Amino acid sequence: MLAKLKQTQQLNFLLPSLKEQLSSKHPLYMLANQIEWSFFDEHFNKHYREDFGRPALPIRLMVSLLILKHLRNLSDESIVEQWAENAYYQYFSGAEFFTPGAPCEASELVHFRNRIGAEGIELILKESIRINGKDGKEDKASVDTTVQEKNISYPTDSKLHRKIIKKCVAIAKKEGVELRQSYSRTLKKLGIEQRFRTHPKNGKKARRADRKVKTIAGRLLRELVRKLPASMYAEDLNLFQRILQQKRTDKNKVYSIHEPDVLCISKGKEHKKYEFGSKVSIALTQTTGVIIGALNIAGNQYDGHTLEAVLEQQQRLSEHVLSEVFVDRGYRGATKVGETMIRSPKAFSKKISHYKQQKLRKGFTRRAAIEPVIGHLKANYRLSRNFYKGIKGDIINVMLAAAAMNFKRMINIWKKFFVATLQSMNQLAYCQKYQQHFLKITF
C-alpha cells in the first residue's frame, strides 16, 4: 500500500528547508518544479493495494531515481549511494530536509520498474516531451533505427558449451544428484588446447578440443535428464538441448544462456559487423531536436515495416500528427503511413518544382542530425549496453534513455539562458561605468 503523507511543517523549525537553502537557478531545482509529479501519482496509484501490506516508498521518489539514473548515466547502486550525498538529488525527489541515509535499497528500483511496466515508463517519456512545450509538436520529424546491445559477451559455441557444463554441475550439486564424472581436470587441459587456436600448428588441435567440450556438455545434460524429474528445470534443460543442436547456418539461434532472446543484427558498420541485442527506432523533431518516439522493435524487421508502430507511439505521446517523416534509404519502399508522408532519398522527378526539390534536400540534410543524437543516447544515457533483463528490459531501457535526453535538453536551454542573462548584465554594468567615466571627463 502507499504510505500516508507525513506532516513535516513542525519538524526542524530551527533548520531551513532544502527549498530555502538551495539555489533556485540550479537546473535540477528548476526541473523539479516543472515536472507534474501528481501526473505520476494519478496513474501509478492503481499498482498499489489500499490498506494492505507494508507502506511503499513515495512514487515521486522512485520516478525521480529512475530519471536521475539515466540522466547521470549511473547504475542502480550508484544512484542510491549518490542520493545520500547530493542535496539537489534529494530536492528533486521531493525531500524537504536533507537526509544523510540512502532512500531505499537498489533492488527497490528493479521492483518498481517491474511494477509500473512499459506503460508506466512510457508516461515518463510523455512527460519529458511535455516539458519541451511547442518544440515537441513540429510537423516534420526524422526517424532512424539502431541496435541497443545486450549485456552479454561475444558469443561463440565453445563459450556456450562450457557454460552449459558449468550450469549442469551447479544443478546437480544443488539437487544432490551424483554425476559419474565432473570432467574438471579434462576441461582444464582442453581449455589450454582451445586457447592457442590462432597458431598455425594448433588449429586442428583446437577444433578437436571444441568437439570434445561439446560431447562432455551433451553427456552431462543427458545424465541430468535421466536422473531429475521431468518437471524440474525443464525450461533450462530444453534451452541447453537447443544450443547443442543448433548449427552455424540455423536461424533464430541462441547466443546467450541468461538472455536467450538476443538477436544478431548487422547494420553494415565497418568497425562492428554484428551487434547482439535488439533493434530500436528513434523519432526526432527536425529543427528542435526533441525525441518524440523511442520504440523497441520485436525481431529483426525491415525498417520500412517499423514505421507504423513508431508513428502510432509518437501520436500517443505527443498528441500530434506529423505531416512528413524523413528517413534514409533503409526505408526504401515506404511512401505513406496514415496521413504522414514518408520521404526517402531518391532521384527527383521532373514534375517536382525547383522550390520543392530544395525543401526536400534541406529535409534530407537535416535528417542526418539524428545520427549524433543516437550517439549521445548510447554514450551518455545508457543505450549502448542494456543491463535490464529480458524483452521488457529492452522496452524500458530505450524509453528511459530518450526521456533523460529530453530532460537534459531543457537543462541545457536553461543554462544558456542564465549565461546569456549574466553576460548582458555584465555588459550593461560595463556600459554604465564607462558612461559615468565619460561624463566626469567631459564635465
Image (cartoon, rainbow, N blue to C red):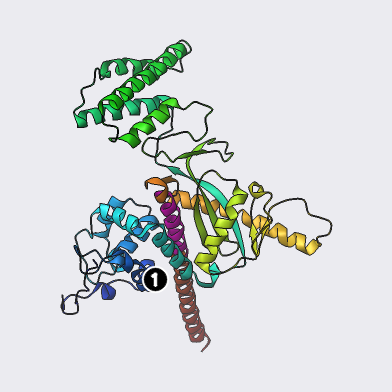
Q: Give the range drawn in magenta.
A: 393-409
Residue plotted at (16% across, 76% down): 11
Q: How many circles with numbers are drawn on the protein? A: 1
Using the image, determine if residue 286 lies above or below residue 30. Answer: above
Using the image, determine if residue 269 lies above or below residue 249. Answer: below
Instruction: Please state if 54 lies on the left or on the right of 92 as rendered.
Output: left
Out of 6 and 299, give the one closest to the viewer: 299
Instruction: Please state if 216 lies on the left or on the right of 131 as rendered.
Output: left
Q: Quadrant of residue 348?
A: bottom right
Q: Does the magenta stretch include residue 95?
A: no
Out of 302 and 92, give the one closest to the viewer: 302
Give the quadrant of the N terminus. Answer: bottom left
The reply to whether residue 270 is in sight is yes
Pointer 1: residues within 10 angstroms few (<14), some, or many (20+)?
A: some
Residue where numbered disc 1 is placed: 35
Q: Does the magenta stretch include residue 402?
A: yes
Out of 379 and 292, give the one closest to the viewer: 292
The reply to whether residue 381 is in sight is no
Residue plotted at (21% across, 26% down): 177
The residue furthest front is 230
* Residue 142: x %, y % from top left: 60, 58
Using the image, determine if residue 56 lies above or below residue 387. Answer: below
Instruction: Please state if 169 lies on the left or on the right of 425 as rendered.
Output: left
Amino acid of disc 1: Ile
Residue plotted at (44% across, 55% down): 401
Residue plotted at (52% across, 61% down): 313
Q: In which quarter of the image is residue 237?
A: top left
* Residue 423: x %, y % from top left: 47, 72
Instruction: Please state if 160 lies on the left or on the right of 351 as rendered.
Output: left
- The local secondary structure at tag 1 comes to loop
Out of 57 and 14, give the one closest to the viewer: 57
